[in-house]
């Protein structure tokens, strides 16, 4: 039996070899590997395409020029976070801080050792090490950090370093070719290419109400380790600092696009951090919101554009000028503004003491106002300047309740005991908002107080009924206040 099996195996092997010979069309087995011919004797036809050659050389030249200015950063830090997230049951709740290693990339911005990177790269660091392209290694000190833009500056003790050229991110166009240079996944000096996919992106990764997000979106591949590296144009100018990536939430790796901080913001932050260790950022002192179509109709704009001022902060820069809640900022210093982050990023490129010119739409007119920016510290713990003088006329008898079914909104008169809680002296309380209604679509919810419609005070439910009756088929501008006394404006079209 054993002999038979061996015979079958031998036949199969020989058959396989013989079959291979037959398929090859050769009647014998090659006696030497040297007889096997590979490749063609005819080189490809050379097509003289100067444009293609020049385009290709742009990438090559940019990589050669900028790569020496990009460094690898290694960070040691103390962390209390559990490395086995999701398995806390197996580990003590009050574990001691443990040392961990991380890092990213950085851009040399001066020949004497200043390096620009992300705040999240060096945050909490106890030791920072920088590796250059020429394999030299330095210990670095943290000069300063700015969590509100996710930027930081570190310094190494060296001279005659290859500082990068910092370009002008305001000149970027969607569709423009760019390259990302950094150290992803510990693969040093990696270069990827793509285009500018979008500008002015806000992705809500800076968890602070004063955070500045005006990202350049790109499809040039960016992965963990690219943070703090350079986004450059094909002239070799750094136009952004790579900061964030979109991931699938599982592997944490690149799935198609990443985000970079515009270099015009980064330059101002870096200069402040180098000169004083902190950012002297100026603030207008307003709370703002995007203008939607209903709001535009309510205030008489021909289309939704500009930024609505929901609140003016007492003691802030705007409170010193003729700026009011309900004003709509159309442009700043001639630059059109349509999203809150566009205004925030522009102001972030200025310093306290700088003046800006706002073009404002108010009650059908356009007016200009000059504002001298102030430090944020002067604005903290302040309240709205919107303080009303008129007393609410308390309704006698039973509290009136009315439902506006066409809006999905139910309101009642405001009790005197509630007025103080809302920091108002008049208004009607929203008690119910129907799911998927017009009211809900405009971010109205139970617990808000309607204090004004079209800048006229509302002191009772009956007054609101009269106003809505007269506004059928038109848009109304509502002023609402929440339980913390914070007001905002809402545009609401009243159905016929």
Image (cartoon, rainbow, N blue to C red):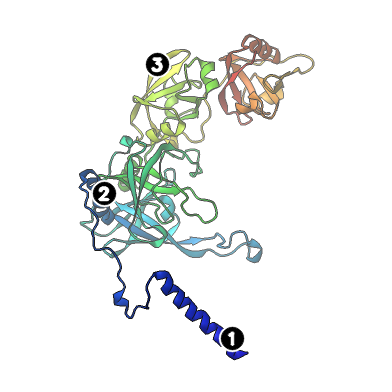
Q: Earlier in the sequence, mark 3 or mark 2?
A: 2
- The answer to whether 471 is drawn above or below residue 149 in the figure is above
Q: Name the residue rendered at 59%, 86% in the picture.
A: 5
Q: Name the residue rendered at 59%, 64% in the picture.
A: 95
The residue pinned by badge 1 equals 5
Work out whether residue 440 or residue 377 is closer to the camera in this orientation and state it.
440
Q: Earlier in the sequence, mark 2 or mark 1?
A: 1
- The answer to whether 392 is drawn above or below residue 377 in the figure is above
Q: Rate crowding at label 2 as few (under 14), some (14 to 19) or many (20 or more) other CA atoms within 10 Å.
A: few
Quadrant where the image shows the N terminus:
bottom right
Query: Is 439 displayed left or right of 188 in the figure?
Result: right
Query: Is 231 displayed left or right of 463 in the figure?
Result: left
Asked if the residue at tag 1 contacts the one at tag 2, i.e. Cβ–Cβ closer than 8 Å, the answer is no
The residue pinned by badge 2 equals 56
As helix, strand or loop, the secondary structure at mark 3 comes to strand
**Residue 255 rendering spot, x and y as whole percentages:** 47, 50
Work out whether residue 324 or residue 327 is closer to the camera in this orientation and state it.
327
Q: CA distance from mark 3 to mark 2?
A: 50 Å
Q: Name the residue rendered at 25%, 52% in the picture.
A: 60
As helix, strand or loop, the secondary structure at mark 1 comes to helix
**Residue 493 rendering spot, x and y as whole percentages:** 60, 18
């Amino acid at each position: 039996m054993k002999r038979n099996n061996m015979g079958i195996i031998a036949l199969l092997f020989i058959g396989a070899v013989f079959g291979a010979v037959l398929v090859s069309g050769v009647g014998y087995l090659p006696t030497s590997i040297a007889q096997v011919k590979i490749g063609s004797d005819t080189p490809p036809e050379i097509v003289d395409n100067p444009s293609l050659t020049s385009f290709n050389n742009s990438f090559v030249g940019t990589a050669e020029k900028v790569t020496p200015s990009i460094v690898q950063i290694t960070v040691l830090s103390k962390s209390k976070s559990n490395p086995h997230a999701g398995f806390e049951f197996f580990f003590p709740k009050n574990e001691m801080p443990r040392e961990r290693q991380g890092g990213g990339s950085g851009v040399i911005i001066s020949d004497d050792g200043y390096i620009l990177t992300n705040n999240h790269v060096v945050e909490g660091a106890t030791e920072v090490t920088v590796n250059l392209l020429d394999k030299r290694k330095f210990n670095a000190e943290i000069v300063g950090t700015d969590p509100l833009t996710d930027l930081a500056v570190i310094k190494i003790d060296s001279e005659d370093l290859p500082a990068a050229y910092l370009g002008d991110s305001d000149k970027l166009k969607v569709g423009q070719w760019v390259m990302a240079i950094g150290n992803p996944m510990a693969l040093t000096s990696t270069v990827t290419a793509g285009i500018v996919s979008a500008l002015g992106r806000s992705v809500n990764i800076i968890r602070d109400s004063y955070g500045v997000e005006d990202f350049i979106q790109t499809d040039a591949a960016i992965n963990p380790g690219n943070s703090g590296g350079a986004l450059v144009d094909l002239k070799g100018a750094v136009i952004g600092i790579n900061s964030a990536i979109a991931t699938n939430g599982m592997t944490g790796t690149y799935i198609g696009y990443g985000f970079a901080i515009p270099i015009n913001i980064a330059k101002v932050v870096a200069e402040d951090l180098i000169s004083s260790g902190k950012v002297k950022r100026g603030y207008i002192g307003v709370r703002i919101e995007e203008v939607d179509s209903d709001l535009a109709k309510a205030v008489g704009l021909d289309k939704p554009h500009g930024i609505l001022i929901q609140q003016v902060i007492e003691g802030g820069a705007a409170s010193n000028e003729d700026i009011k809640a309900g004003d709509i900022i159309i442009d700043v210093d001639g630059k059109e503004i349509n999203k809150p982050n566009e205004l925030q990023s522009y102001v972030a490129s200025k310093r306290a003491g700088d003046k800006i010119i706002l073009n404002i739409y108010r009650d059908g007119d356009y007016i200009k106002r000059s504002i001298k920016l102030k430090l944020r510290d002067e604005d903290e713990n302040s309240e709205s300047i919107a303080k009303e003088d008129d007393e609410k006329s308390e309704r006698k008898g039973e509290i009136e309740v009315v439902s506006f079914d066409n809006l999905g909104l139910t309101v009642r008169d405001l009790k005197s005991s509630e007025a103080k809680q809302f920091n108002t002296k008049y208004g009607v309380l929203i008690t119910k908002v129907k799911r998927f209604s017009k009211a809900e679509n405009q971010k109205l919810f139970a617990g808000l107080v309607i204090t004004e419609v079209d800048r006229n005070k509302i002191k009772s439910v009956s007054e609101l009924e009269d106003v809505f009756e007269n506004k059928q088929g038109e848009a109304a501008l509502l002023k609402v206040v929440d339980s913390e006394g914070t007001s905002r404006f809402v545009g609401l079209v009243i159905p016929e």
